[in-house]
Image (spheres, coloured by chain):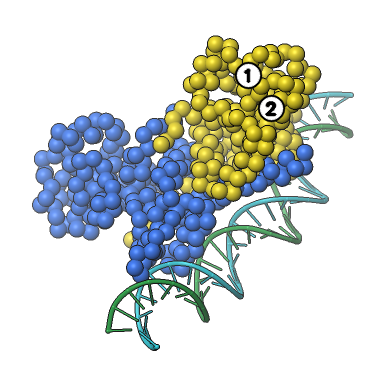
Chain colours: A blue, B yellow, C cyan, D green
Amino acid sequence: MKDARKIKDLLYEQVARIGKAFASPKRLELIELLCQGEKTVETLAREASISVKLTSSHLRELRMAQLVETERQGKNIFYRLADKSVADLWVQVHTLAEDRLVDLQLALQKIASQPDDLIANDRDSLMKAARKGEVVVLDVRPSEEYLNAHLPFARSIPLEELRQRFAELPKDRAIVAYCRGPYCLMAVDAVALLKQEGYSAIHLREGIAEWSITSKSV
Amino acid sequence: MKDARKIKDLLYEQVARIGKAFASPKRLELIELLCQGEKTVETLAREASISVKLTSSHLRELRMAQLVETERQGKNIFYRLADKSVADLWVQVHTLAEDRLVDLQLALQKIASQPDDLIANDRDSLMKAARKGEVVVLDVRPSEEYLNAHLPFARSIPLEELRQRFAELPKDRAIVAYCRGPYCLMAVDAVALLKQEGYSAIHLREGIAEWSITSKSV
DNA sequence: TCATCAATCCATTAAATATCAGAATAAGCA
DNA sequence: TGCTTATTCTGATATTTAATGGATTGATGA
C-alpha cells in the first residue's frame, strides 16, 4: 500500500514537470515565440523583452521538461520545440484559459474591439475567399517566421515594413491580417495602420499554431 | 510600446493561472479523481491520501483558476470539474508527459509489465469484441464512479468486491479491466487477482477521460 | 594565441508556494 | 437554542521558484 503511494506520487510528479513548465508567463511567451520557428536565445530575449540571462534560465526549465531542443549553429544556439504536440498543448491551454477566465476575456476584448474590429473566425470560408483572391491574407510577422511556416495563400509584409509597402496591397479587397496568435499585437497594429490608409482590414486572432490544430474537442 | 508590454504580461499571466493549477502533483491527482465524477472534499482527501485541510487548499487553487465548481448538498460540499475541457486538458498533459519524459515511461513500464501484461490499445477492435461478447470489459472503480460514467459494454465490480464476486465472471473469455486511468493501480491489481484465479485478464490503460478524447492530434 | 561574442553556470535575494495547526463558518440535528 | 460535522480561513514555517549580477565555458575570427 505504502509502496503504491510512492509510485503514484512519482507518476504525478513527472506530469507536474510539464505543468510547471507552463506555469510561468515568461515561459509561455517563449513557447509561443518558438511556435513560430527556431530562434536563438538572443532573439527570444529581445522579442520577449527580457534579459538574455533570464531567458536562458527559463529555456533551461523548458529543456529539462523536454519541451524544447537545442542545436548549435556557429556562435549561436538555436532553440526549437521538441515536438508539434508542445505547440498543440500551448493552444489547448490558452484556449481553455480564454474559455474559463473572465479577466482574460475582458483583456482580450479591450485589445480587439478598441477599433471595433471584425474578427474572422470561419476558417473554411476564409480559405475559400483567399483561394479565389477575394481577400488578401497578410502575414505581418518577421519574414523568417513567414518562411518557416505560414497560412495558405498568405503573403508576407512584416509590420515594420508595412508603411513603406502599402503599394503592394489592393484597395478593392478586404485584407485579413494575422500574426503569432491572439496575444501578439502586431496584427492589431497592422489593421489600425491599414484602416488609417483607407483599406478595409480585419484581424485574424489565430496564428499558425492555432490554425494547425485540426480538431476542436467539443 | 511600454503599454503593449503591460497588456501582454497581463495576458500571459492569466494563461499561467491555468498552468499553475496543473503544476502540482497533488492537484493533478485531484483533477484525475474529479474526472471520475463529483466528490466531496472528504472523499477526495481519502482517495488522494492527503489531509482534508490540504485537499481543501488545493481545491481552492483549482477553484480560483475556474477549473472546478462547488455545490453544497446538505452537510457536504461537492466538487466537480467546471467543464469537460478540463478533463481533456488533463489527458493532453499526461499524454505529452508520457511521450516526452523518459523517467515517466520507465515508471509506467515498471507498473504495467511487472506481470508482463498485455495492454489493449486498439479501441475499435476492443469495442467490436465487447459488443459481440467475446471479451468482458470490467470496470473496477467504486460503483459511484461507474454509475456516473463508464465505457460502453462495461460491467462493474469494484476492486474491493472482486474476491467475493469471481463467480460472476466467465472463465472462457478474456477479461479487460480498467480503472481511473494510467496512473491508477486498481486495474493492475485486478488483473493480478484474476490471473491468480486462472482468468485470462488484460489491463486497459485508459479510463473514461482518456477514452472520451475523440481525436488524437497527430 | 588572444580577444570576442553567445550563452550558461553559480550565488544571492526576493517572492511565491506547500504544508500544517488552530480558529472560524455554515448547515443540520437534538 | 446549543451541539456536531464538514469545510474553509488565518497565520506560521519550510521549501521552491524568479530574477539579478558576476564569473565561466565554448566556438569564432583576427
> Disc 2 sits on a residue from what chain?
B
Which dot marks residue B191?
Answer: 2
Q: Secondary structure at mark 1?
A: strand
Amino acid type at image mark 2: Val
Q: Quadrant of the C terminus of chain B?
A: top left
Where does the image place residue B61, in percent across and percent down from the top left?
A: 61, 44
Q: Are marks 2 and 1 on the same chain?
A: yes
- Provide the residue designation for mark 1: B174
> Is residue B52 something one can see in this rendering?
no
Quarter holding the N terminus of chain B is bottom left
**Where D24 falls versus A207 (above or below)?**
below
Between B87 and D13, which is closer to the camera in this rendering? Answer: B87
Is residue B162 positioned above or below A55 on the image?
above
- The residue most toward the top is B132
The residue shown at (19%, 47%) is A155
Label 1 packing within 10 angstroms: few (<14), some (14-19), many (20+): some
Picture coordinates of residue A163, whole percent (x, y): 17, 57
- Name the chain under label 1: B
Residue B173 percent across, percent down from the top left: 63, 15
At x 39% / y 32%, what residue is drawn? A215
Total labels: the figure holds 2
Kindly identify which numbered label has been placed on residue A59. none
Q: Secondary structure at mark 2?
A: helix
Residue that appears at 60% across and 22% down: B149
Relative horizontal placement of residue B15, taking residue A199 as reference (left or right): right
Neighbor class of circle 2 (other Cα within 10 Å; few <14, some 14-19, many 20+) is: many
